[in-house]
Image (cartoon, rainbow, N blue to C red):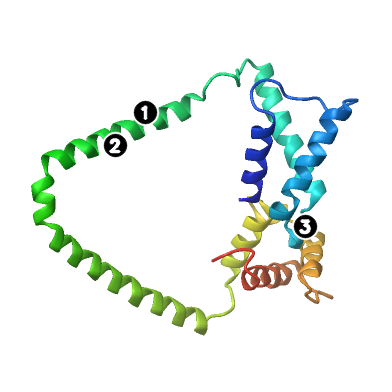
Amino acid sequence: IRRKAIRTAAINRWPGNDIPNFKKNKVAVDELNDLVNDLKEDCSFPPLNFGKEGIKQHILDVLNERRRHKRKGHDYSQPDKRTLKRKVDQGTSSDSTSTDNDIGGSSSASGSSADHEEIGDSEETNNSGDTESVEESDENEDLDEDTAKLVVCVAFNAIQISQISRTQLQSSAKALKITTKKKEKNDLVKIVAEALVEKGFVKV
């Protein structure tokens, strides 16, 4: 989520084909630093040591990617075809819904009580399901190995656990104030994952 917010902010700051080159361009560098400072509070992630430098590097990566696409002929001044298609699809859907409402208005009104009953049933089901979920989580506070690996991969934005080094896990554990002396990598994965979930950085 943080990386997506950084990407969006970078594109909003430098839209279109005017992608700055920061070498020997003090104005552009100042603009970059200002954007990093604006994003620092919301997009930093201390457990992974992702701060100002990480934010800055991600902005540069986004702009470099756009620069490569521009060289290959992509025109960022033109509307994104995927965005246009979504808007057309949404417009078609809303028109269809409006027509259905006009045609079936009376039947919708007559069926309102039935709809209300269905909603009530679903709420009862959800409430009972939520209670069961809480009871299960109380009994099984520890994460299993696969879930722990998934949590850590999500936090580190990695595809496989092998992409994350023991040193990275130790740094994260230190930031999370966890003692990690003489811990194997699998132990660190589990400990860091549980701390990330407990402190609310990742939700399971």
Q: Is residue 181 above or below residue 93?
A: below
Q: Is residue 188 above or below residue 11?
A: below
| Nearer the observer, 174 or 21 | 21
Q: Is residue 59 above or below residue 180?
A: above
Toward which corner of the image does residue 173 lie, by quadrant?
A: bottom right
Q: Residues within 10 Å of mark 3 (few under 14, many from 20)?
A: few
Numbered disc in front, either 1 or 3: 1
* Quadrant where the image shows the C terminus: bottom right
Measured as percent of width and height from the top left, residue 132 is found at: 39, 79
SS at mark 2 in the image: helix
* Residue reaching furthest to the top: 73
Count of picture labels = 3
Q: Earlier in the sequence, mark 2 or mark 3?
A: 2
Q: Is residue 86 above or below residue 40?
A: above
Residue 131 appears left or right of 53: left
Q: Earlier in the sequence, mark 2 or mark 1?
A: 1
Looking at numbered disc 1 in the image, what kind of residue is underneath it? Val
Q: Residues within 10 Å of mark 1 (few under 14, many from 20)?
A: few
The residue that disc 2 covers is 94
Q: Which mark is residue 165?
A: 3
Looking at numbered disc 3 in the image, what kind of residue is underneath it? Ser
Looking at numbered disc 2 in the image, what kind of residue is underneath it? Ser
SS at mark 3 in the image: loop
| Nearer the observer, 71 or 90 | 90
Toward which corner of the image does residue 97 lie, by quadrant?
A: top left
The residue that disc 1 covers is 88
